[in-house]
Image: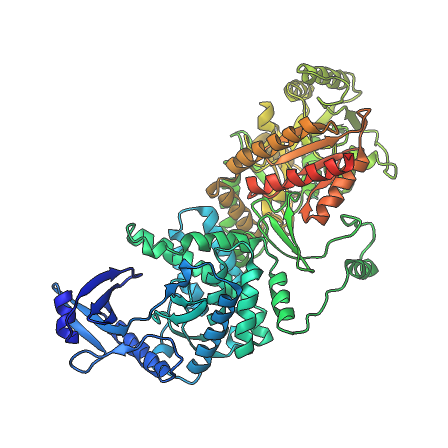
Amino acid sequence: MKELVERELGIQVTEIKELNGYSNKNYLIKSNNESYIFKTYPFHQETFSFIEAENRTLLFLSQNPNSLTPNPVLFKDGTYVKKMHYKEEFLIGRSLSFLKGEFLADVNPSEKLVQSLGFFLAKMDLELEKFDDFVIKSRQCEWDIQHLLLNEKYIEDIPDPKDRNIVRYFFKQYEEHVGPVVHGLRKSLIHSDANEWNILVKNDEIAGIIDFGDMAYSPLINELATAMAYMCYDKDDLFAFALPLIKAYNKVLPLQKKEIDIIYYLMTAKLCISVCQSAHAKKMDPDNTYASVSEKNAWRMLYAMLKINPLLVENTFLKELGFQVPSPEPAGIKLEQRQRFVSKILSVSYDEPISMVKCAFQYMYDAYGNTYLDAYNNIPHVGHSHPKVVAAGQRQMAQLNTNTRYLYDALPEYAEQLLSKFPTQLNKVFFVNSGSEANDLAIRMAKIHTGYDKIMVMEHGYHGHTQTGIDISDYKFNHPKGQGKRNHILKTAIPNAYGGKYTGPECGPLFAQDAIEQINTSQGGIAAFICEPIVGCGGQIPLAEGYLAPVYDAIRTQKGVCISDEVQTGFGRLGDVFWGFEQHKVVPDIVVIGKPMGNGHPMGAVITTSEISESFEQGVEFFSSFGGNPVSCAIGKAVLDVVETENLQENAKVTGDYYKSLFMELQKNYPSIGDVRGSGLFLGIELIDESAQPNTELAQLIKNELRKRHILISTDGPFDNVIKTKPPLVFTKENALRVVEEIGRVISRKIK
Ligand code: PMP
């Protein structure tokens, strides 16, 4: 290489050192008192043309004496770029003047330095606005934010499925938020890669910018968004660095509102490009360490960005740059508006309701810029706005959506996949649109199959809002304003090992004996016994061990059927099992599912045996307009796939065990925590007072205080003194720790 450089440049090389490069080889060349950068690239005509264009840009910029950009250096033959023969290969060679300074990556940037970068980039962009080049204009660079989608093909190269989904989520956000406005943004030639290894620094000032290899004709704002992403991606406080940068840039080159509105999504897009490119480069060449120099920080920041409400970023930037930010209406007014048209019987959470606008995985964003950690909602089972679920629904909606009177493959395919999660005798599925509807149907089937009318239900149980649902839900019919228990309903005690009639390890069979006694003395046959494996409205109460199997036996002996309502407990939430009934070593005759099934898309189903299904077939036709439609099937399938590929049942187990252990530690310090129960990511924490009575006041205080600290949990149980936490299964140990620490703080303050 030394000989080649000496020959082509006509200089005496005193030192030659190879430098890091993404896909090309670069050398630092010293000759007497001069230093040069000699760059080589594998020969492609397209690369050649682009490097010529890059040089044209550098020559243009160098006309300004303050440009601080490298100058192209002529070869002996009077050219700036040359095709060269080297070691049996053709290379492209070019030389640039060497700029002195430290890399921004190697300094701890002061606010002044960050501002200096803002001024510098804006000035460079003002110069570039005057320059035009058709080669650059016609190029599509994968690193250019506007071509984010070119990187979609590399998502599969990211090894961890969870990481892949974060990237998919931000791709989707780019499409939604930037896609519709991108064509209205002003465009210019931009450097497009102001990262910390391309910026040189001297005496707390910017001393230069190198590597114009990603230059693009792109929305101007992408220049700043790129610099902001790289400036902030290894820092804890986004605004501490982003604000001085954007303000300085804006002083020299004023930004437009529509540009500021989307910076959050442009920054995350650049970070996505970085992780996609790193993953791909690593796959192609596992030894290329330079290709992943930014990767760790980019991942760190992508995860950190999820915790920041995009509105907060948008509004903070707008305000700081002097734009008017409309203040959203207070939640109280929004509630009034709602109640003008919608009945007050629909209650809202919290004394001060939350106006939500957006969500991502385990985070929810309100209209005021706050981010809530969702430790409560179990419907977005695999995470809010999960990109795979969203994509499955959108794709199918654009393709075909109809009802079960036509043949389409999605129905049997999803049915087969869902049934594969059940014991073999549960081999028929009926799709409906909610848990209530599914329970209603299950009861109808049980009555038709057995010819009996009576239904045995559990104290505090809840199964739905239809008439049958209310009839079988003690939580509703036994409410002071409820309809009361109907004659055909037989209510049995909740087998609660904490504070119930029986306690201790043998309490399950004792509760069972009482229930069996009721069954055996019932006047007329019992068509079905229905209960949840963990009674949600009862206060997250797991059925005591040893209870369910003997009760199921007694029901079957008198020819009734056993129904497990898995609307809340199903799909792996409990960690050690996929369905709650598995914890009790029983197989029900009918299983009812809902809530998490569609991750928020309205779905429910009844799963049963062929015998019960055949009895049902003797009656009138069953048809549900929406049940089992292609869109629902596609969404349901995506949910099952995600639970599997992201090992979410395993995460429910590992994170849930840790979460529970933290609560149990807390219990050791605070006697007001009477019980910690449940499994996986389905936990209940019962609060009591000094005389071991339900402490509703403390439970409500915790719920409302956590809301102020931007954590969502809720309370339940007949005395509303049980904290319930059933977060999306992507919940992390870090999330769990935060919830328990905050609860600890509220309790300790209350006690002091
Ligand atoms: N069963 C159980 C155990 C439930 O928790 C619920 C809803 N809370 C239902 C049934 C009713 O489901 P849906 O609201 O989808 O009608």
| Residue 449 seen in the figure | no
Q: If the image is split into quadrants, where does the N terminus sit? A: bottom left
Ligand 1 occupies quarter: top right
Instruction: Say which quarter of the image contains residue 77.
Output: bottom left
- Taking the image as shown, residue 707 lies to the left or right of residue 274, namely right
Q: If the image is split into quadrants, where does the C terminus sit? A: top right
- Estimate the x, y position of residue 120 in percent, counting from the top left: 46, 74
286 versus 647 height, above or below = below
- Taking the image as shown, residue 499 lies to the left or right of residue 305, namely right
Q: Residue at x 54, y 62 (%)?
A: 241
Front in this rendered view, residue 459 or 663: 663
Q: Residue at x 77, y 37 (%)?
A: 750
Total number of numbered discs in the rendering: 0
Front in this rendered view, residue 17 or 526: 17
- Estimate the x, y position of residue 211 in percent, counting from the top left: 34, 69
Front in this rendered view, residue 451 or 584: 584
Color encoding of the figure: rainbow
- Taking the image as shown, residue 244 lies to the left or right of residue 693, namely left
112 versus 127 height, above or below = above
Q: Residue at x 35, y 72 (%)?
A: 212
- Estimate the x, y position of residue 153 in percent, counting from the top left: 39, 58
472 versus 596 height, above or below = above
Front in this rendered view, residue 455 or 403: 455
- Estimate the x, y position of residue 79 in percent, counting from the top left: 20, 81
| Residue 581 seen in the figure | yes
Instruction: Say which quarter of the image contains residue 681.
Output: top right
